Image: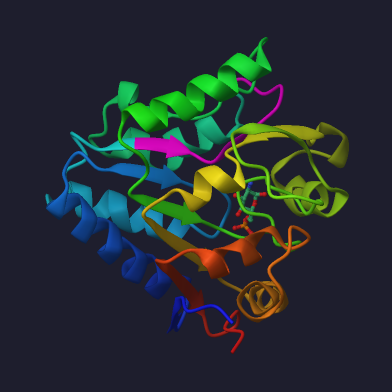
Amino acid sequence: MIHARVIKVKNPEEMGKVAADLFETLIQTKPACVLGLATGSSPLPLYRELVERCKAGKIDFSRVRSANLDEYKGLSGDHPQSYRYFMQENLFNHVNIKPENTIVPNGQTEDVEAMCQAYEKQIEEWGGVDLQLLGIGHDGHIGFNEPTDHFPAMTHEVELEEITRQANKRFFNSIDEVPTAAYTMGIGTVMAARKVVLVATGADKKEILYKTLCGPVTPQVPASILQFHPDVTIICDEAAYPL
Ligand code: GLP
């Protein structure tokens, strides 16, 4: 059983506020911190809250650096379904973070190995991730680390599971448009973060959260590795609360 802090909140909005408090505290104590950021619907209330707090002068992103978890293979940063685009639309365009201080894996790289290595190196040069934000997929994936027979260490290319493509097709015109592969930080990259904050809302996340927290640590449930991380906070709403 995980020794994580599990915070139950009423709804996604409250989740956003509680998570934003953690970000605000970190940015105030370490203005040049490194954030590991995530996409998906779950972090949206948090990003809205961060934008509001930045506009209200409570959070200053001017020295913050950020590294995103993942990106679809083949999509350019200006593709509306790319994760770079998502980050611009939902956070970066609305806060005072410097564009050069935000990195997302390059979905259109021609040299996958070099891109993945450079991604890891940049994070290392920045001094490592202080706070890694995570959502969770229905199969327990974090970033795009899908269930497999091992825990991948570094940023790498992955084939997406059908369940993941189906879950994400709501953002595309049809399932055929959903990429079949992606680039993602590895489990090792995630585990190297000093602090991990996982956000999950909705009844459809309850079962996988239970497996993550209380099941065996197995690469078949990638998020279960978080049981071995010393500083994990899980913020979930009542519907997703698994305990
Ligand atoms: C995608 C992302 C994950 C995210 C997951 C869940 O697959 N790569 O980082 O956690 O979706 O998304 P949602 O929060 O929309 O359920």
Q: 35 or 14: which is nearer to us?
A: 35
Q: Which image quarter holds the C terminus? A: bottom right
Q: 162 or 88: which is nearer to us?
A: 162
Residue 78 appears in the rendering: no
**Colouring:** rainbow
Q: Whole-percent x and y of residue 11?
A: 47, 78
> Could you tell whether 32 is left or right of 153 in the image?
left
Q: Whole-percent x and y of residue 50?
A: 30, 53
Among the 4 quarters of the image, the one containing residue 90:
top left
Q: Whole-percent x and y of residue 106?
A: 57, 21
Magenta span includes 69:
yes
> Could you tell whether 211 is left or right of 124 in the image?
right
Residue 128 appears in the rendering: yes
Residue situated furthest top in the rendering = 110
Among the 4 quarters of the image, the one containing residue 222:
bottom right
Q: Which image quarter holds the N terminus? A: bottom right
> Where are the magenta residues, as a range?
66-76
